[in-house]
Amino acid sequence: MDAAPILRCRGLGKRFAGVHALRSVDIDIYSGEVVAVVGANGAGKSTLMKILAGVLTPDSGEVFLSGQSVRFAGVRDAVRAGIALVHQELNLADNLDIAGNIALGREPNRFGFLDRKAMHTQAREWIERVGLDLSPASDVSTLSIGRRQMVEIAKALSLRAKVLILDEPTSSLSMGETSRLLMLIRTLANQGVAVVYITHRLNEVLDCADRAVVLRDGQRVAEFSRDQLARERLVGAMVGTIHESQRVELRSTNEKSQARLVVRGLQTQAHPKSTINLSVHKGEIVGLAGLVGAGRTEVLQSIFGVDRRIVGEVSLDGQIIAPSDPVVASRCGISMVPEDRQRDGLMLEDSVRINVSVVKIARDSIAGFIRRGAERTGVARMIDLMKIHPTLPERQVALFSGGNQQKVVLAKWLSTEPSVLLLDEPSRGVDVGARAEIHTLIRKAAHRGAAVLCSISDTEELLLLCDRIVVMREGRIEGEMNIADATEEAITRLAVVGGEDVASHSEAAA
Amino acid sequence: MKKILGIAGIFLVIVIATSILSPNFLTAYNIENLLRRTSLFGILSIGVGFVILTAGIDLSIGGVVCLSGILTPYLLNQMGWSATETVVFIVLMSVAIGVMQGGLVAYGRIQSFLVTLCGLLIFRGLARGVTMDQTQGFQGKFSELRWIGNGRISIPGVEGFALPAPVLSLIVIAILSMIFLNCTVWGRWMKAVGRSPSAARYSGIPVARLQILAYTICSLLAGFGGLLFVCDVGSAQPSDFGNFYELYAIAAAVLGGYRLSGGEGSVVGVVIGAAVMQVLRNAIVLISWLPDTAEFAVIGLVILIGVLADEFLRRYAANRARTQAKGT
C-alpha cells in the first residue's frame, strides 16, 4: 500500500446552521482496502460520506481522486468518477422489479425500446454476486428490508465503482447475510476496490476492516490499523468515556413466575405449514433469533394482530385473546414496536408529544375527551425517563436522530405500562449509546413485570439483552436455550442448519 | 395558526378589492346574502374536511345534496309526510350513505375517489329517477321548516340587516367539529389515521372505524346541507341541484389549509375558505367588467395561486427546519 491513495481528503469541513457537522477531517483511502468509519450517531459519518459521494459539497477542504482535485456537482458526477454510495435509507423504486432497480437510469435498450431480456441477464449476474437467491423479475416491494439492502448493494456493484461506500449496510441484515456481505466486501477489496464501510457493529469492524477511522463530534479522533484494532479501544474512542458502565444489570430473577404470554398452534400467512408454540413469562426477555426471512417478524405481527389471518390462539395471563386485531391487542396490554419505525412506528410530521401520547390519551380520557394536563405531564415524564434529546415535546419527530425516534416509539408504549412488549429489531440504526439506553429501558419494563419478546438479528445483542433465546428457521422454531447456555456459535448453527439436522448428525456420529 | 392567517389575509384582500371595484358589495342586502351562502357551503366544507383529514376524498357531496334537496319537498308534498318524519328520514339516509361509502373504503379497500365518484352518479340518478326529473318545491307551504334555510333573525336596533338563520347551524356545527377534533381521543386519532395509516394501525387505533366515521359525518352534513339549500331556495331541479358542490367544498377545505394527503387542517380555516369562495363568486357577478361566464376560470385560478403559495411557504419552512436540525 505504498501507492498513492485513490481518495485523499484534506481539511474537510461542513456546517449546518452554524453547527459543525464536520471539522477539518483528513482521510486517505487506498485501493484494495476496507476502511471502517465508526462513530456514534451525529459524529459526522454520514456527512463525510455524503461529501465523498457528491450529495453535499464541503464548506472547506479538498477531495482528491487519483491525485486530481475534484468537486462533485451531484451524485451522478461522483458515480461517473467511480464513487458509489449505498445509502442507509433504502433508495429503491418500489414499483420496479430487481432488474429495473439495478439498471435504473441506464437501462439497456434496442431502438429506444427497453431491452428487458438484456436487463435481466445483466441483473442476474449482480444478484448472484451478492448471494441473493431471487429472480431479477421479483418485485422489490415484496422483499424484506434485508433483501432490499442486498439489491442496493448489487446496484452499487453494477456501477463498477472504484470506491464503494456502504452506509450501515448490515443494520438490517441477519447473521448469515451479514457474513456473506463481509465476505463479498473482502472479495471486492481483493479485486482492487476501495471499500469505505460505516457501521455501528464493532464485531464487523474487527472481522473485516484493514483500518478503522473513528469520528466524534465531527472530528477524526483516532485511527487504528489492523493490528491495533480492539473492541475496547474503538468504544473508548467513539464515546470518549467507556460506555460499558451503562450495562445496568437488571436481568430478571430466574425463579419461574407464571407464563404471561402463551402462543399455541400459531400459523402465519408467510409460513402456513409450520406451527409456532411459545410462552414468555412475567419479567422475562425472550429473544427470537434467526436469519432474515425466518418468520420472526410474522410471529410478532400475528400476536399483535397486524397480520390478519391467523390460526392458533394467543393468551395473556391465561385468558385467550380473540380475535386478532391490534385494537383488541393494544387494549389487552399487548404492545408492539415495529421494525420500520419511520413507516409503522411514527407519525413523522407530528410532534414528539402527539406521538408519545397517542395511545395513552385514550387510557386517561374521560368520556372520550383528552385530559390535556395529564397528557402534557405524561409526555414530559417520558421524555425525561427515556432521555429523549433534545427535550422539546413540540418538535417534529422527523427532526430527531434514529435513536431518539426509537425512544419515542418505545415511550408511546412504555407510558401505558404494557403487560407484553413485542419488539422487532429494537436497536436497528441506533448508535451505541442509545442502544445501551434502550436495553436498559427494556430491562426495566421486564423488571416491572412485562413479558418481552424481541426479534433481533444481531447475535451479540441477543446475548446482551435476553434471558432466553428462541431460534427460528424457515418459519419454524428450531430450538431454544437459556442465556447461560447460549453462545453465538450455537445460535448461528440452529439458525442456519436447524435443530433436526444437528440432531441427526450427532446420532449418525454416535 | 399561520395557515389561518394566510387564508384570512386572502379573504381580506378580496373583500377590500371587491368593495373598491363595486359599490353594491358592502350593502346590507349583499352581506346578508353572502353570509347565507357562506354558511350553507361552509357546512359542506366542514364535512368534507373530515374525510380529507383521513387522506380520503368525498366526491359524492353534490349527489347527496341533490338527493336530500329533492326528497325533502318530495316526501312532504308527494308522499304527505310530516316535517319531523322527513327530517328524520333525511338524517338516517345520509348516515346510511356515509356508512356504506366509508365501509367500502375502509373494509373493501377501494379508493375513496372511485367509491364516491360512483356515489355521486348513483345519488343524482336516484333523485332524477324517483321524481321523473320533475322540479320539486314546497308550494308555499312548510314555512316553519323552511326557516332553518331562509329565515332571518333580526338584530335589535339594526335596520335593514338581519342574520340569516343558516349562520346558526354553521356556528353550532363548527364548534362541535372543533371540539371533536381538538379535544377528543377520536379526533386526535382521526388525524393520526391521515398522517400515517400504518403507524395508526400499529398503535392500536381502530383505523377502519374512524374512516367510516369521517365519511358518515361528511354525508350527514351534506344531507343536512341539501335540506338547508332547498329550504332556502324553495324548489329544486333534479338535473342540476347541487351540481359541482363537492368541488366548492373540497376547494374551500384546501384553501382553508387541509392537505389532500391527510392529517392536517382546521375548522376555522375551512369556514374562511368557504367565505373566500363565496366572495369570489359574488365579486364576479358584481364587478361589471368581469363576465359572469368566466366564474369557473377565475375561481380555478385563485385556488391554484393559493395552493401554490402555500406549497412554496411549506417547502421554505421545511428546508429551514431541516437545516437547523442537521446541526444538532
Image (spheres, rainbow, N blue to C red):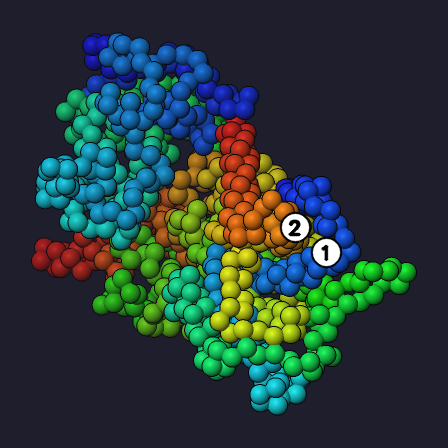
Q: Is residue B29 left or right of residue A475?
A: right
**Viewed as shown, does residue B269 lie left or right of B130?**
right
Q: Residue furthest right?
A: B157
Closest to the camera, between mark 2 and mark 1, is 2
What is the quadrant of the N terminus of chain B in the image?
A: top right
Which label belongs to residue B30?
A: 1
Residue nearer the viewer, A138 or B181: B181
Kind of residue sitting beneath label 2: Leu
- The circle drawn on residue B186 is none
Residue A121 visible, this orientation = yes
User: What x and y, as percent, mark residue A57?
Assistant: 40, 20
Q: Is residue A224 visible?
A: no
Q: Position of residue A21 (x, y in %)?
A: 48, 23
Q: Residue at x 21, y 43 (%)?
A: A100
Of residue A438 and residue B207, the one placed in the foreground of this image is B207
In front of the other: A86 or A488: A86
Q: Mark 1: which amino acid? A: Asn
Q: At 38% across and 69% down in the image, what residue appears?
A: B108
